Amino acid sequence: MTTEELVEQIYKKRSFLCIGLDTDLEKIPPHLLSEPDPIFAFNKEIIDATHHLCVAYKPNTAFYEAYGLKGWESLERTINYLNEHHPEIFTIADAKRGDIGNTATRYAKAFFEALNFDSITVAPYMGRDSIEPFLAFKNKHTILLALTSNPGAFDFQTLKVDHKELYKQVLETSRTYKNSNNLMFVVGATKASFLKEIRNIVPDHFLLVPGVGAQGGKLDEVCGYGLNHQVGLLINSSRGILYASDGKDFAEKAAAEARLLQLAMALELKNRKLGS
Amino acid sequence: MTTEELVEQIYKKRSFLCIGLDTDLEKIPPHLLSEPDPIFAFNKEIIDATHHLCVAYKPNTAFYEAYGLKGWESLERTINYLNEHHPEIFTIADAKRGDIGNTATRYAKAFFEALNFDSITVAPYMGRDSIEPFLAFKNKHTILLALTSNPGAFDFQTLKVDHKELYKQVLETSRTYKNSNNLMFVVGATKASFLKEIRNIVPDHFLLVPGVGAQGGKLDEVCGYGLNHQVGLLINSSRGILYASDGKDFAEKAAAEARLLQLAMALELKNRKLGS
């Protein structure tokens, strides 16, 4: 998918919501556990109920790998369902991969070709030759970890290298990589004020922002610092939507939570006269 | 497996060789392609021919994921074969994973429990709460990327933070993590001289060193800087062994290459009076 198609979808749906499909057998409604593939059954109902309210889905591969072969099958079914029934949706493999040269190319093929995801999250630690193989794929997007939303982000990401935090160096250096126009960045919403400086370094790139809940109330702050001329934000919510109910009404309740976020996003777009 | 059992195996076999199972359908002998599972067929023959010469096998998960479900099956068959027929072997999932909290626990369960690997490689960028969930598993080992052997290593790993390279900060900080005795570190052999300073920071931990080939001639240098009182080194070779021949004699030729490395290692152990 091209960035232009993603932006078009955002304007059409008045939403830049990404739903994280972190599907956990211990949290899904018990009545689904008798299905042949409970994880896919859950994802399918969530997708059917929410696809008009969001522009992206982001399965975290750890949740699927944890169930071995069966989990991998559930991931395949989920991405195939999205690609077949909702080709307008931007799909993100939240895999946080990172390896060198030819090995990186293999990961890229696994996710961009075999599974046909639009994008994948990638870790920056190994540098240029671990990232450029992903960037070489046309109309595919590489979402590089910059500043994550967990406490451990302060262990290394915010250390100063040459009077500048490491995550800023990651933003600056990665912009020099070949095909860097295919880059997006993960920026945690727990540090919304950091978004201002990040926007100065990468004014045009899309940012994937996890850690904004319907209750968090940080959406306006993230939008204030993060929106750019073509929106430039994907805001992710996972558990707040997926597990809004563990009854048979789970999909309906999930849609209600997604609707709250979508309405708030529509308001942000309107206030900033984006896409209208 | 405990570290003591690994060391015992090293002394018994007079080898600290790890064989990287980076199995590539485009490189394996063509006569195997008619097998139901060519990747596993190749791995099995390599293992049968070399297990007495090495102490560890390290499948890089990218090579398996690239083939989707079938690849994942090949990986399962390979690790099951190792655990069943060669339980003395130390197994490494070269997965370079890294994610937060509960998600990290899921990766840990996937590799330590479902697949029953002895260890996994993990990326440090996300910090403490992305690594401690792996360290919590008893008699399982977390091999943290410190200094990798690719050119991109110089993008971030060698940047100075507080007058000290980032990879040294990774070594020092990670030693403060809970259960840090379960840590090992990846240190690329292209920078053998760096091993001296690394050994000062982590005198007791095992180091996994990729990038030493039978031809490279760097083995003595790596041993000089890297060996400690309990060996403390696993030296990996992948392509030099796996693809020594693409004929029907591939396993025999692989064993001959592995034997060369094992003999050189036996000499290093003897010269340093380790385990004798």
Image (spheres, coloured by chain):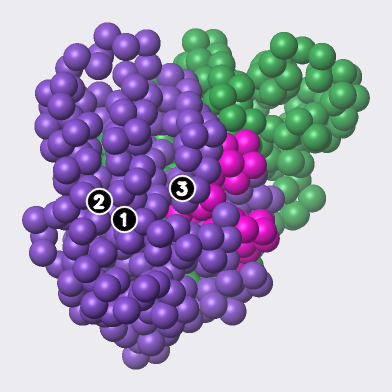
Chain colours: A purple, B green
Q: Secondary structure at mark 1?
A: strand
Which numbered mark, 2 or 3, is in the foreground of this view?
3
Label 1 to label 2: alpha-carbon separation:
8 Å
Q: What residue is drawn where x is 36% and y is 56%?
A: A13
Give the mark, 1 or 2, whose residue is nearer the N terminus: 1
| Residue B267 seen in render | no
Check the image and name the residue furthest to the right. B247
Q: Nearer the viewer, residue A274 or B266?
A: A274
Label 2 Cα crowd, 10 Å radius (few <14 / some 14-19 / many 20+): many
Q: Nearer the viewer, residue B93 or B268?
A: B93
Residue A61 at x, y percent in the picture: 41, 39
> Where B203 sits versus A267, above or below?
above
Q: Chain of mark 2?
A: A
Residue for badge 2? A237
| Quarter of the rendering containing residue B112 | top left
Mark 3: which amino acid? Ile
Question: Which residue appears farthest toward the front when viewing the image?
Answer: A276
Residue bearing mark 3 = A89
State yes or no: residue A202 in magenta.
no
For label 1, the residue is A17
